[in-house]
Amino acid sequence: MTTTVLPTRPHSHATTLTATDPYQTELRETVVWVDRAYNDCPRCHQPGQRVVDQCPVQINGGACVGGEIEEWDQRHGCGEWLSVDWEVVEPAGDEPTDEEIRVVATRLLIARDQELAKTNAEIKTRLVTELREALGRLAEPLEADETDEDRCEEVRTGSDTEPGVCRDGHLWLAWDYTSAAEVGDDTITVTEREV
């Protein structure tokens, strides 16, 4: 199998795979794929791999006449299949043009962006719920021998460096990283003024 990286757009990749079938016919397929729309494994929440540098498929030339496209194993350590969205470019001519590759990349990126938006909306909904629960607990009367600081420590689940519910000055907020953020990158924040 030979791969050649082709021009694409950010978060998308393309390569031309080659192989030879049992009748010595050279096979060529151009594949486009996009990075995952999440960092952590959906099942065990351990770090996964958002950026997918390696083409997720290969041509098995020995499978049959014309070969067969097969996915590489994308199984995480917990057993969850960390899927990669990919598509074979169907060229109008013998070889796909850069424009045909870009069209496929755009289609896959639109689907990725929709998944990102949905996941980020779910994160924001979760943060609103967490902050409302924390603010509700803060509004409850203190127990005997409990101080305001004790109650604040009870509801605080994060800090300025760790996601969760925390206090910024006198303002309570909840925050987390976006679904595909790099460490220290984009965050989603909800403040007590918003809930």
Image (tube, helix red, strand yellow):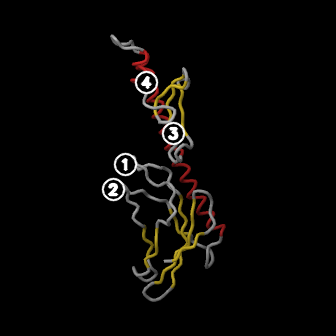
Residue kind at label 1, given as amino acid type: Arg
Q: Amino acid at mark 4?
A: Ala
Of the numbered discs in the image, which one, if any, rests on residue 166?
A: none
Find the distance from the CA under tag 4 to the CA under tag 2.
34 Å
The residue under label 4 is 134
- The reply to whether discs 4 and 2 touch (Cβ–Cβ < 8 Å) is no
Dot 2 and dot 1 residues touching (CB under 8 Å): yes
> Can you tell which mark lies on residue 43?
1
Q: Real-space Cα distance between discs 4 and 1?
A: 26 Å
Q: Earlier in the sequence, mark 4 or mark 3?
A: 3
Disc 2 designates what residue? 79
Mark found first going from the N terminus, 3 or 2? 2
Residue drawn at (50%, 66%), measured in percent from left and top? 55
Location of mark 3 (residue) = 121
Q: Residues within 10 Å of mark 2 (few under 14, many from 20)?
A: few
Q: Is residue 128 above or below residue 93?
A: above
In this orientation, which residue lies closer to the viewer: 39 or 102? Answer: 39
Report which quarter residue 153 is drawn in: top left
Q: CA distance from mark 4 to mark 3?
A: 20 Å
x%, y% of residue 112? 54, 53
